[in-house]
Each structure stands twice: as structure tokens, then as C-alpha cells.
Amino acid sequence: MNSNQQPVITTRGISRTYQQGPVDVRAVDGVDLSILPGEFTALVGPSGSGKTTLLNLIGGLDRPTAGEVVIDGTRLNDLDENALIQFRLHHIGFVFQAYNLIPVLSAAENIEFIMLLQKASAKERRTRTQQLLKDVGLEKLGHARPTQLSGGQQQRVAVARALASKPAFVLADEPTANLDSHTAESLLDVMEQLNRDEGMTFVFSTHDPRVIARARRVVTLVDGRVDSDEA
């Protein structure tokens, strides 16, 4: 990795405070973080350490109480809600623990849906969808609905969908949490290969030792702060 590269993700002093009754709870507390293109990074820490909140702040799904988030040179704080939705659509891929696939659509249609929102041509959508199904090892299951797929297969569709928009990076929130060991390792193989072959940047929120073992950088959060950052 070239140290002269510009970060694809930068957070400067970001904090996120929630009201719990009369108490202010600081879920993220003054985090400075830079992620370069091509990194394979895990955010780890005990339950309640702020992993998912930090991931949501980076992804523009939540807004910081203080500090700023800069993605691919764009300061998310400056975007209104509509602009933020459009920015996420074109720049950020998401993989969620619960898959979040649309049940009435086939695997191929779930992947294609993002490109439809981006107004990509029908030919481009078909070509990219078939390539992505192949990339995640599901080229023969594009017609299947989510209910006809195993948990691991659904999560592979979710990874392909995250990549469909050609994002600057993919945020994966506990992507292996609902998977058995063999299926989790297989999914991680796919993501590692995409990272290695296509230079796709991945940032995981996880407590799964299988993910942590694969990560080339591990950022540990404790009480909303960065406790250690090891490459």
C-alpha cells in the first residue's frame, strides 16, 4: 500500500452522544481514524464499545454530535439528507448482519436494484450482476429468492449487492454473526479475494475471531475511544 495515497475515510474528533433518560451516553468519544484505499480493517471491542455506532457514522447512517467525517474528499457534515442519500448510493457499500435482502426479488434482482437506483443502463446492470454473482460463487443461483438460499448464500448476495454500485469502500457490520464456521470462512475467502484482486476496501465491525484473524489492521475500541490500532 502506498503511504502517499489519500485516505478514503477520515474521521476527525467524532463523537456521538445519546440521551438515555436524564443521562448523556457518549457511544463514540473523539475518534480520529484514517483508512487508506485497499485496507482490510476490523473495528473490534466489547459489546457497547461503539463499533457499530462508529461504522454508522462513517457510512452516513448517523450524524456525529461533534467532529467531522470525510469520505473520498467529501465532508459528510456539509450534506443535507437528500444529498447524503445520493452520496451513500454512489460511494458506500453496506453489508448488514441481517442481510436486508428484498424478499420478493431474486438474488440477481437484489444485486441489480442498486444499479437501477443509479440509473445504469439495462445492459450494464445485467453484465455487472452476472459478474458479481460469479465473483461470489453464485452464478447458478441468480434466479433464486432469498428464502430459497442458505444464510451464507444470502450474505454472499449482500456482499455482491454492496459491490454493485462500485463503491469507494464496503462497511460490513458483524457480517459473519449468523453464520456457522465453515460458511463464515467461505464468505471471508470471498471478501479477501475481492480485496486482493480488485483492491476493494473493507471495514468490519466485529467480535468474531475469524474476522479478526483475517484483518490486516485491527482497531480496538473501548468506551467509544480508540484503545489500540495495530497493523
Image (cartoon, rainbow, N blue to C red):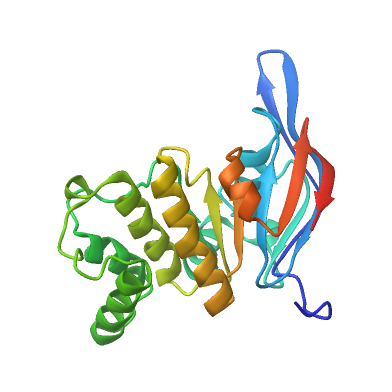
Residue drawn at x 43%, y 71% is: 165
Quadrant of residue 92 within the rendered picture: bottom right
In the image: residue 75, left or right of residue 211: right
On-image quarter of the N terminus: bottom right
**Quadrant in which the C terminus is drawn:** bottom right
Left or right for 190, reference 74: left
Question: Furthest-front residue in view?
Answer: 182
For this view, does 176 lie left or right of residue 38? left
Residue 105: percent from the left, percent from the top?
19, 56
Q: Residue at x 74, y 16 (%)?
A: 23
Question: Percent position (x, y) of residue 213?
Answer: 64, 50
Residue 143, can we see it?
A: yes
Q: Please tell me which residue is depicted at 30% across the width and 70% down the height of the picture.
A: 133
Task: Count the labels in the image.
Answer: 0
- Residue 217, by quadrant, is bottom right
- Say if residue 12 shows up in the picture: no
Question: With respect to residue 34, does 209 lie above or below?
Answer: above
Which residue is most to the top? 22
Q: Position of residue 5 (x, y in %)?
A: 78, 79
Q: Is residue 34 above or below residue 72?
A: above
Examine the rendered structure and indicate whether residue 40 appears above or below residue 121. above
- Seen in the picture, residue 126 relative to 44 is either above or below; the reply is below
Looking at the image, residue 147 sits to the left or right of residue 110; the answer is: left
Q: Position of residue 178 (x, y in %)?
A: 41, 38
